[in-house]
């Protein structure tokens, strides 16, 4: 679950926002009624981005290999990972 708060709460009621974040929830901040930003704990951010970081590291490693693949091979591998 997540909470929606006005951006002014970041300044005026930080302890309340910090308390919500410590539970692992996301806090969506609004400005003039529109979404402005999301606040989350570092642990939650890491949980969300770890897989992406790992895949980017694998891509960097593969890019350094002298062997090159055709675009058919690359897209076949990507489809395989996405589908299974």
Image: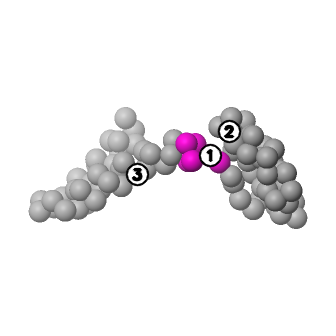
In the figure, residue 68 lies in which quadrant? bottom left
Provide residue 19's location: percent of width, then percent of height. Answer: 75, 40
Q: Secondary structure at mark 1?
A: loop
Q: Secondary structure at mark 3?
A: helix
- In the picture as drawn, the residue positioned furthest to the front comes out as 15
Label 3 and label 1: CA atoms lie apart by 17 Å
Mark yes or no: residue 2 visible.
no
Tell me the quarter of the image containing the C terminus: top left
Provide residue 18's location: percent of width, then percent of height. Answer: 73, 45
Q: Which residue is mark 2?
A: 22
Which residue is depicted at the point 19% across and 62% down? 64
Observer-nearest residue: 33 or 46?
46
Main secondary structure along the magenta-highlighted residues: helix
Q: Are marks 2 and 1 in contact (CB under 8 Å)?
A: yes
Label 2 and label 1: CA atoms lie apart by 7 Å
Which stretch is magenta? 40-45
Q: Is residue 44 left or right of residue 68?
A: right
């Amino acid at each position: 679950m997540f909470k929606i708060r006005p951006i002014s709460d970041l300044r005026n009621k930080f302890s309340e926002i910090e308390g919500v974040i410590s539970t692992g929830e996301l806090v969506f901040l609004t400005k003039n009624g529109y979404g402005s930003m999301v606040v989350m704990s570092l642990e939650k951010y890491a949980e969300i981005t770890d897989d992406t970081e790992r895949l980017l590291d694998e891509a960097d490693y593969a890019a350094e290999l002298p062997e090159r693949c055709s675009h058919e091979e690359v897209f076949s591998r990507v489809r395989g990972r996405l589908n299974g």
